[in-house]
Image (cartoon, rainbow, N blue to C red):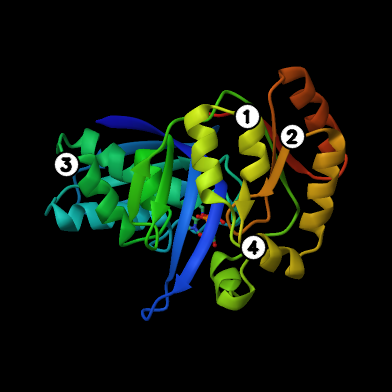
Amino acid sequence: MTHFEKAPAKINLSLDVLGKRDDGYHDVEMIMTTVDLADRIELNTLEEDRVEVTLWSRYVPNDERNLAYKAARLFKQKYNIKKGVHIKIDKVIPVSAGLGGGSTDAAAVLRGLNQLWNMNVPIDELASLGATLGSDIPFCVYGSTGIAKGFGEIVEKLPSPPPFWVILAKPDIGVSTKTIFQRVHMNEIIHPNTEGVIQALHEKNFDMLCNHIGNSLEAITTSLHPEVLYIKEKMRQAGASGVLMSGSGPTVYGLVEQQSKAQRIYNSMKGFCQEVFIVRLIG
Ligand code: ATP
């Protein structure tokens, strides 16, 4: 039996850090939406009780450290499944980029195994299961557009943004989310206007959305990697209406309404960045 599952990347329309908890995690508030840049996951049942991962990437392990592997093992343990699975990952989303690549693979494996093995596990239960592996996984289980709270385990659906184009530009560096969160000092955090983003989504107001997107981690990442600021500036000069770093970075995204303008910005950014993508929202 074979099952294919699409694992789309996410961008953060807002990311706020509200406080540090006693368990070391941070309380966050993140508005995320999925974009049409996706890894492709192929799942094949194995008669033997084991998990295998195949993927071609210099940066991602194909053993038990892979988040997709961890998700499959967790699913099998939780529902006491004795057969195994071979997971083939066609990696398209840049790694350590702030686009949730590992999280979306893990989420796709949870959704996919639920289908492959006809388990009928409710989606909320899959999201809770995913939360034990990573804070972006619950959102990725649902996809679309939503706000994640707590350390990411509480997800509420939000209206989709108005239709627009997204240009993604990833500077040639990887950023570890853990390293950035370790540098969070609550007294220095600049909070984005999360309510403004929510209102813009409800009103489907593109300009309002562009004026309110914000990311508390941006100042920390850019202090370590000033090239992110350079890319932001170039994206703005090229004509993007809303420009922000996604997640803990370093990918910068630009939002525009017209396709022709998006294409011009894409061409322009190609001069500064190797990894540039032009995508539609699917959130
Ligand atoms: P986020 O935005 O959720 O913080 P990210 O996009 O910054 O995530 P990922 O691409 O998810 O970062 O990769 C982070 C780390 O996870 C890398 O060190 C990578 O090797 C590891 N990893 C494990 N499994 C995967 C996977 N299936 N895909 C990508 N990275 C994975």
**80 or 50, which lies in front?**
80
Question: How far, Cα to Cα, is label 3 from label 4?
Answer: 34 Å
Q: In the drawing, does residue 139 fall left or right of residue 237?
A: left
The numbered mark, 4 or 1, whose residue comes first in the sequence reads: 4
Give the foreground label among 4 and 2: 2
Any mark on residue 175, and which? 4
The residue that mark 3 highlights is 121
Question: How far, Cα to Cα, is label 3 from label 1?
Answer: 36 Å
The numbered mark, 3 or 4, whose residue comes first in the sequence reads: 3
Q: Does the residue at mark 2 contact the one at mark 1 (Cβ under 8 Å)?
A: yes
Going by the numbered disc 1, the residue's amino acid type is: Phe
The residue that mark 1 highlights is 206
Q: Name the secondary structure under disc 3.
A: loop
What percent of the width, then of the height, locates residue 6?
A: 43, 33
Question: How far, Cα to Cα, is label 3 from label 2?
Answer: 41 Å
The numbered mark, 3 or 2, whose residue comes first in the sequence reads: 3
Look at 11% across and 54% down and name the residue there. Answer: 80
The residue that mark 2 highlights is 241
Going by the numbered disc 2, the residue's amino acid type is: Ser
Question: How far, Cα to Cα, is label 2 from label 1?
Answer: 9 Å
Going by the numbered disc 4, the residue's amino acid type is: Val
Q: Does the residue at mark 3 contact the one at mark 4 (Cβ under 8 Å)?
A: no
What percent of the width, then of the height, locates residue 275?
A: 73, 43
